[in-house]
Amino acid sequence: MKEYSAERIRNLGFFGHASSGKTSLCEALLLAMKQNTRLGSVAEGTSILDYDEDEVARKISINLSLGYGEWRDTFITLVDTPGYADFFGNVVSGVRAVDNGVVVVDASSGVEVGTEMAWRRLDDAKLPRTVFVNKLKKEHASFDSTAEDLRKAFGNRVTPVFLPIGKEEGLSGVVDLLNDKAYTYENGARKEIPVPADMKDAISQWKEKLVEAAAEVDESLMEKFIEGGKIAPEEMRAAVRKGIKAGVVYPLVCGDALAQIGVDVLLDLAVDVLPGPLDMAPLAATKLDSADALEIKPDENDAVCALIFKTVSEAHVGDMNLVRVFRGKLETGMVVMNAKNERDEKVNQMYIVKGRERVEVNKLTTGMIGALVKLKETHVGDTLCDKRQPAKLPPVVFPKPSISVAIVPQSKGDEERVSTGLARLHEEDPTFSYEFNSEIGQQLINGMGELHLDVIVARLKRRFDVHVDLIKPRIPYRETITRKCEAQGRHKKQTGGRGQFGDCWLRVEPMPRSKGFEFVNAIRGGSIPTKFIPPIEKGIVEMMEKGVLAGYHMMDIRATAYDGSYHDVDSSDIAFKLAGSLAFKNCCEKAGLVLLEPIMNVEVTVPDQFTGDVMGDLNSRRGRIMGMEVQGNLQVIKAQAPQAEMYKYSNSLRSMTQGRGFFTMEFSHYEETPRDAAQKVIDEAAKAREAAQK
């Protein structure tokens, strides 16, 4: 492969709402860069980038994927990310790898939830952004209303640098405001034409707004514009380039990926004005031997520093780690250090990647994105660096899973294979996790939504030949008491030889919520020898784990041992352990037992028109609305709801909001279960005990 200096490298990440056409745009860019002989199609299953079996079957992007090509002597890497919130972890990974975010918007839908999510993530990373208004040939597609929608949501810094010629089916080309040129397209081929006379007013208005935005970094540009002086294209490009780097201009471009209109001018924009690796601000890092900060500046001749931002599992290669080189270069045969575990890693084979295709290279220089294989102890978020200049970049922080489902292997003896498969899948996708919850006795898998977990189960079946059933997870209810009570526990058993004797009096009382358990030894006068006090506590703890009301773990109780008796010969640890558990049970049965249920913090983000329906649905789930806040065109509803009522909520939300809403959920606290709901749980537990005894 030809070598490129960092000046001739661009890394573009594509983000946005599901079905906005990100992958189709990337396919059109690959075709423009002659990386394909025909336009790959997601709908027809011929996409270069959506090649995974699940992606082909579902016709959606699930994984982050890479593509590359050359345009005007510049090496351009494309990072395509999914739009569904279930696969948002790939967006997080992609943001860490690129220098420019291209936010793709469907011209018939405008700003959607996925647009807002991607924008906020890019904003947090302080990355330059370009907006591509796509699908302008669709019925009801409107560039003007979409542009205003974008400026309303993200501010007036979103400014067109291209305008469409024609609309809907009549879309034929674009006007380039930076270069004062116009182009039409036929079968993807661009042809320069005179600027349409009927667009002069629109061009003048938008150009003024572009100058206003760029003037924040170049005041002379505004002075020249006000005085009526002609602004040369090179002056405009230079000012816009400065504005993009400074974060005061977000260029708005437009076209239609499937019709290949406006695609090649996006590549021109990347070469002419979008920042490259050398334009990026230094990265914050830390030293290994202290928490002292240091900066990683992009320099091809300095010591290597690179970040693993994604792991992909390949059938014949094993784990393939996608890497971005921020400083220096990686070369075949080089030994680098993993800054997280301070272990050496030898760089073996390296590739640049286009969909499932890999081209082996012997060097990845500053700014390049590639893939490493056969790394022994390196994972997502790890930094690879020169051990002579060790530095650790911040890890990739992924969102926490929001839903859990229990899985059961269909075949006995498959538990080990299930665990192996789940571990491998977690390595690829850190937003997926798994655990065996001993409290409820189930193997749980946790993800970002039902679609996410469906994909995980499909991969488990296909790649590891493990078949599992998904079942509703049990709710980890808790039990507690509501009033103070005292009772005796007396264990006496006489056998032919030595007997068993233990006798204690306990006082139990409720504690504030989430304070756990406290044991108090108030024995005075030696009524129970000191050596028998720990067994009493152990008996209480074991009874708390079993539960008294419905078999659930007990919490928020103080138990005080204050009296009792013993026998010089027959008393023993086991006798007092049994006496302690019996005393505790007798106390609880008189102390107003209640069932506690887990309450979740829920945040639902939806377009404004669905707010009423979503709030009504949350109320029907015994949810409490805690507040609302506005984020651009969206409403964020904050609520608390019982975990028992939130099973399969993402399906309901998708149905209510036409797929435009998403939610996050995490545990908040326990509180008392309403009597009717509690009685159902208690009755079910009783039936389960009866069935187990038969």
Image (tube, rainbow, N blue to C red):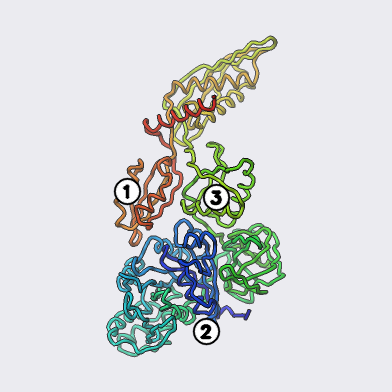
Q: Nearer the viewer, residue 81 or 218?
A: 81
Q: Foreground: 387 or 662?
A: 662
Is 501 situated above or below 228? above
Q: Residue at x 56, y 20 (%)?
A: 523
Q: Which residue is mark 1?
A: 615
Q: Pick whichever of labels 3 and 2 is earlier in the sequence.
A: 2
Name the residue located 57 percent from the left edge and 51 percent from the top edge: 461
Query: Disc 2 marks which residue?
Result: 72
Whether residue 461 sits left or right of residue 19 in the image: it is: right
Tell me if I can see residue 85 in this picture.
yes
Q: Callout 3, which amino acid?
A: Ser
Q: Position of residue 299 (x, y in %)?
A: 60, 75
Residue 561, disc: none
Dot 1 crowding, Cα within 10 Å, few <14, some 14–19, many 20+ = some
Considering only order in the chain, which callout, 1 or 3, is on the residue closer to the N terminus? 3
Quadrant location, the C terminus? top right
Please, what secondary structure does the residue beneath circle 1 have?
helix
Q: Amino acid at mark 1?
A: Met
